[in-house]
Amino acid sequence: MPARVVTPHSLNSRQHSMNLILRSAVDTDIPALTVLIALSVRQLQAGDYTPSQLEGALQSVYGVDTQLIRDETYFVAEVGGTIVACGGWSKRRTLFGADHCAGREDSLLDPTRDSAKIRAFFVHPDWVRRGIGARLLEVCEQAARSQGFSRFEMGATLTGVALYKARGYREVERIEVALDAGEVLPIVRMAK
C-alpha cells in the first residue's frame, strides 16, 4: 500500500516554505529512522538525562517499533527527501518502547474505552523549534480520531513534556523504566 502523504496545502506557511512532507513510514525508512532516533536522543535529551541513561535507553527502550510501521500509524517528516522527524500513534496497548523493549503488549485497544497511544516522537537536532513535532502530533491525533479514539496518552520523555503540555496533555504519573546496570529512565505518563 502506498504511503499516505500530507500535502503542502495542509501545512502552515512556515512548514510549507521548507517543503515539509509528512507521510507514513515504510520498512525502507528503518535505517534512516535508527540513525535519526540515536542522534535526537543523544543531543536533545542530554540536558534531562545522563549519558549512561541515554545509552542504556538506546539499548533497551528507544528505537524503531516496526508494529507501528506495519499498522501504518507511524509518520515521517521529510524535507528535500531527508527524514527530519518521526512520530506516531498506536491502537495497541504498548505505551512506549521499540521492538527490543521488554514488557510490550500488542493487543488491540477499544476506541470506545481506551486511549490511543502517542508514540516515539523524535526530531533531528537541526530541525527543532520549527513546528514539525507539533504538526506530527496533530496528524497522529487526527488519524486516531478517524479510527474512533477520542482520548490519548503517552509515555513522554522529560525533554518532550513541555511540547505535550503546550498541546493540552497533562501529567498523570511518573514512571521509572529499569535500564541495565541499575540505572532508571524517568518517563512521564501524560493524557489528553
Image (cartoon, grey):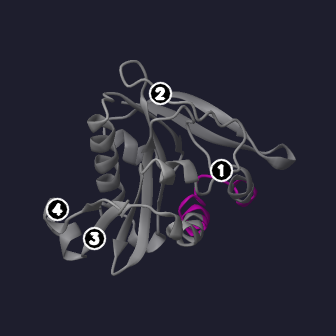
Q: Dot 3 corresponds to which residue?
A: 20
Which amino acid type is marked by label 1?
A: Asp
Residue depth check, mark 3 versus mark 4: number of the one nearer the observer: 3
Give the CA distance from mark 3 to mark 2.
31 Å
Q: Dot 1 corresponds to which residue?
A: 99
| Residue situated in front as seen by the camera: 116 or 132 | 116
Which amino acid type is marked by label 4?
A: Asn
Which amino acid type is marked by label 2?
A: Leu
**Left or right relative to 92: residue 110:** left
Marker count (numbered): 4
Give the CA distance from mark 4 to mark 1.
33 Å
Q: Earlier in the sequence, mark 3 or mark 4?
A: 4
Asked if residue 120 can be seen in this view, the reply is no
Q: Residue 12 carries which label?
A: 4
Which amino acid type is marked by label 3?
A: Leu
Magenta stretch contains residue 5: no
Give the CA distance from mark 2 to mark 4.
32 Å
Above or below for 139 versus 14: above
**Left or right relative to 2: residue 14:** left
Give the CA distance from mark 3 to mark 1.
28 Å
Residue at 36% across, 30% down = 192
Disc 1 on helix, strand or loop? Answer: loop
Q: Residues within 10 Å of mark 1 (few under 14, many from 20)?
A: some
Q: What stretch is highlighted in magenta?
A: 38-53
